Amino acid sequence: MKPLAEAPSTMRPSGIREIMALVAQMPDAIHLEVGEPNFQTPEHIKKAAYEATMEGFTKYTPSNGFVSLREALVEKLRRVDHIEETVDNVVVTVGGVGAIASTFMALLDPGDEVLIPDPGWPNYTMMILVSKGVPVRYSLSPKNCFQPDPKEIEKLITPKTKALLINSPANPTGAVFPRETVEELVALAKKHGVYLISDEVYEQLIFDGGHTSAREFDKEAAISCYSFSKTYAMTGWRVGYAVAKPEIARILTKLQEPYVSCTAAVSQKAAEAALRGPQDCVEEMRQAYKRRRDLAVEILQENNMFICKPSGAFYIMADISRAGMESYDFAKTLLKEEKVALAPGATFGDVAAQTVRVSLANSEDQLTEGLKRLGAFVERRSKSK
Ligand code: PLP
């Protein structure tokens, strides 16, 4: 038989999945590897979904989503992101993943380069490869608290560059880019005629400072991608959306047809209820992550593993250089010896090879216990080197 398609057969799955597969066989392990809220979807959202099902929202929807949801999103974009959009600029997708992957499909021809962060979410690389593009990494140095350096990024732009992707608040670092940085990066993209894809799925999980939407600065070049997964603890409902100029939004709409047809009708109704209903659940979850962030900073500082204080999302990077181990090996050995699961830094890129990512999506007790075991493990390894 002829060979299978190269990119999907050869690309490496994310290291987080590898650890998740191992930890699945360990019922008593402490979970600090998952990028998923440990909260349940709020009751009023679940109830609205049940009612929508009973009312008959069980069929295909328009490819770009229900108009009623897109109208609610236009209001949300005004209220939360301070941007004026129309329903024609908004395309509802299967999660934030659907928004970002569709955007790559809409922009990339074979061989086109996309600048992505290092460290960055591993799925970007996989998405670009399946779209026949070429991922090119730009560094977010721990010395600079994982903030981008626009001058360094500019040096990486070539005639093949089609897009620059930014992610703030960031996974895995929790860094939140200042307003001026977002503005500068949008201007940089515009100057070179490349698109700026802004992954803003953690926009409502910020502890210090505020969020800046890339589309505030330019509606030609910037495409912003959002999700209900993290804000409303709705990972399993699979609802996200992309906001782009109408020319791109039309292509994103068309792209839903061959891949997913549309986002599930009942999930869209749940998302609508999330936007129209009370927002205190968002604030309560944000406060819980903030308390955990503060706790994790304190424990990592005590154990000489602290790098930078995250200002958003629900992750913190920990320095494991003292242990003298490669991060995959470190994560697997830690799991075996201490029953603590976390994500190896190397899965996010070379810059993070001496780190692990700790997820704050677990209770304060579990987080404290997990981080203490992590500290003890690094101490032991550093002495046995
Ligand atoms: N972008 C980043 C940086 C993420 O970490 C995630 C999920 O972990 C997503 C996008 C997409 O999430 P979803 O598809 O659940 O909206």
Image (tube, helix red, strand yellow):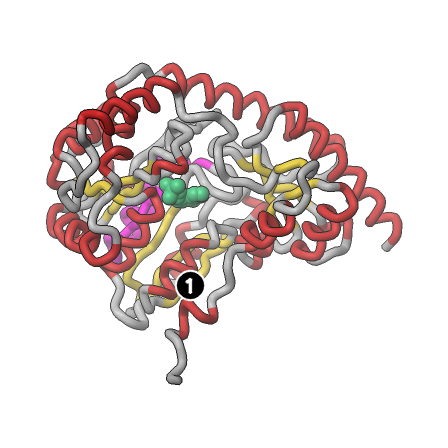
Residue 47 lies in the magenta stretch: no
At label 1, which amino acid type do we have? Val
Q: Is residue 327 above or below residue 340?
A: below
Q: Position of residue 212 (x, y in %)?
A: 33, 33
Disc 1 is placed on an element classified as: strand
For disc 1, the neighbor class at 10 Å (few under 14, some 14 to 19, many from 20) is some
Residue in the picture at 35% in, 36% down:
237
Q: Which residue is mark 1?
A: 136
- In which of the image's four quarters is ligand 1 placed? top left
Report the label total: 1
Residue 32 in which image quadrant: top right
Q: Answer with left or right where residue 349 lies relative to residue 125.
A: right
Name the one closer to the observer, 265 or 190. Answer: 265
Q: What residue occupies the far right of the structure in this picture?
A: 384
In which quadrant is the N terminus drawn?
A: bottom left
- Left or right: 76 as drawn, with respect to 316: left
Q: Residue at x 54, y 44 (%)?
A: 144
Q: Is residue 45 above or below residue 372?
A: above
* In the foreground, 373 or 24: 24
Name which quarter of the figure residue 364 lies in. top right
- Residue 207 lies left or right of residue 97; in this view the side is right
- Horizontal side of residue 209 vs 22, given as left or right: left
What percent of the width, then of the height, locates residue 41? 41, 26
- Residue sitting farthest toward the bottom: 1
Magenta range is: 176-199
Residue placed at 26% from the left, 44% from the top? 93
Vertical order, 69 against 244 (above or below):
above
